[in-house]
Image (cartoon, helix red, strand yellow):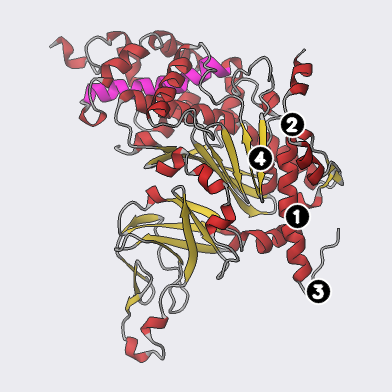
Amino acid sequence: MAGLLADQVKAAPEDEIERLGTDPIPTYPYYRQDYYELEVAAIFRRSWLQIGHVCELLEPGDFIVRPVEFANVSILLTRGPDSVIRAFYNVCTHRGSKLVLEDAGKQRTFTCQYHSWTFGSDGDLLAAPDFQRFYVDKARCGLRPVAVDICAGLIFVNLDSSPKEGLQDFLGPMAERIKTFAVARATSFSEYVYDIDANWKLVIDNFQENYHLRIVHARTGGRQSEDNPFGYPTGFEFMGPHSAQTMPMSGGGDVKPKPVQGLGMAKIVEFAAADGLLGGPYAKDYCVIFPNLFVFGSGMSPFSLHVTPVSAGKSRGTFRFYWIGEDDSASKRFAREFVTMMMRDLHAEDRPSIENSHQGISSGALSHIHFQSQEVPCRHFFHAVNSRVEEYQAALPHKHLTT
Amino acid sequence: MSGTTKRLPAGFEQLEPFVAQWAVQGTATRAQLRGSSTEADRAAFYDAAHDILPKALAYLDAKPLKDFDEKETALMNLILSLGHVALSIEIQGSEDAHHRKVRTHMRITRSAADRDV
């Protein structure tokens, strides 16, 4: 019975399935070091990548420092006296020493601990001992900027010194969608993080299909409706390299009757409604922003997942729950902590499956893997990655990957 | 002087035996405590507290969080821990011991509840 009903749940549109094909997908891109290095060059060094949120830089003088391991760089993000958010390589322009050693803080100037070159939060070199002995103008010694832009409160950087397109063009219709989410008005967040011994794409793929929901999240995945017993998405949209799925269970009507969970969920629904986060056209949308960010439109579970590639076989998943306004009542504090911990239980369950996938795929036992029609976002994502890698590779003079 | 040993507001005396173990500050500490406690400790706390949760929230909601005194803060921390324990009792059930090993990898690095600690 359940199988028959599940078969009736809408799959991706036929024209999208036709466009993306139905052939098996090769495995080597999911583990090989040479392919990973091409991805870093072709995608991560030239795409807009989320690196923070404006609530981390609320006031002039606030700064954060973020490592970007795959590029071996550290990025300094500042909010200047003019309230503008800027991004720089966290490197003193004198002799290349790492400039700011703290992770975050509030200060208007940054002094290198090596020879005391001092920079403003706008990147200008303000002072340096014995500067008259150098053979360069101060005006040419500012911190090296990194392209930065903001959408829906999310701060993105692009390591390309002249990005081929701006952030808004890159996001396309995704931009308007995420502006309706909690993240766009968030003033704080809760966060949990795990390291995963798996290629970054296997992490991404896990989080863009619900096929595993009934198996891996049998207890935590929530009760599904009779006409969609396995919790399949009920809609798919593809927007350039990005995609969105309509989730079946984020409408607030699926509260289990268990006492504490029931009360926690009822409270979070109440606060989401007060914040105007329920019932909007995108409130069930689960968005995949290429290459490595998920943002969920549900006001009850307003989370993002940022997947950091660390190496060909190692990744990090950072989950954030975005909140509008501080905890100002006991019920709000209880509801936020409860829903965050409930989702932590669920998200934690994916790690062993993802690591097992990596172990099997990286063994080389299989030349190809298979995606069904409900896994079409995985197929779409593979093509988005691979087309960029191939385009980059084609432009290289002599380097060709042997498959 | 009978109230000198009371750590919770009046009306929540049934929960006094659980304060020492469960009324702890910090989301990550509460998550860790859920994992390190015994099944019997979690069951005893849950059985005593889950019916009182609505009353506790209603009581605490009468005051802004920032004005909580020591007893109200203890009650708040106690019911926050109840939320963690409820995930083991209401959702994980007999699978909780296995699930603990899985969720240990998920480090809590920031929490809204810790912002004023």
How many numbered discs?
Answer: 4
For the residue carrying disc 2, how many other residues have a C-alpha within 10 Å: few (<14), some (14-19), or many (20+)? some
Q: Are marks 2 and 3 on the same chain?
A: yes
**Structural distance between the alpha carbons of marks 2 and 1:** 23 Å
Q: Name the residue under label 3.
A: A398
Look at the numbered disc 2 and give the secondary structure of its residue: loop
Residue A318, horizontal then vertical, whole percent: 53, 43
Contact between labelled residues 3 and 1, with CB atoms less than 8 Å apart: no
Residue at the location (60% across, 66% down)? A164
Query: Which circle's residue, 4 or 1, is located before the other in the chain?
Result: 4
Of the two numbered discs 4 and 3 on the same chain, state the one appearing first in sequence.
4
Q: Disc 4 designates what residue?
A: A237
Give the amino acid type for the residue marked by disc 3 in the picture: His
Q: Name the chain letter of the residue that bears numbered label 1.
A: A
Which residue, given by chain and number where applicable, does mark 2 sit on? A11
Q: Give the range drawn in magenta.
A: B70-92
Cα separation, mark 1 vs mark 3, equals 19 Å
Q: Which amino acid does label 2 sit on?
A: Ala
* Pointer 1 or 3: first along the chain: 1
Q: Do labels 4 and 3 share a chain?
A: yes
Instruction: Tell me if mark 4 has few (under 14), some (14-19) or many (20+) residues whose alpha carbon lies within 10 angstroms of its own.
Output: some
Q: Distance between the residues labelled 4 and 2?
A: 11 Å
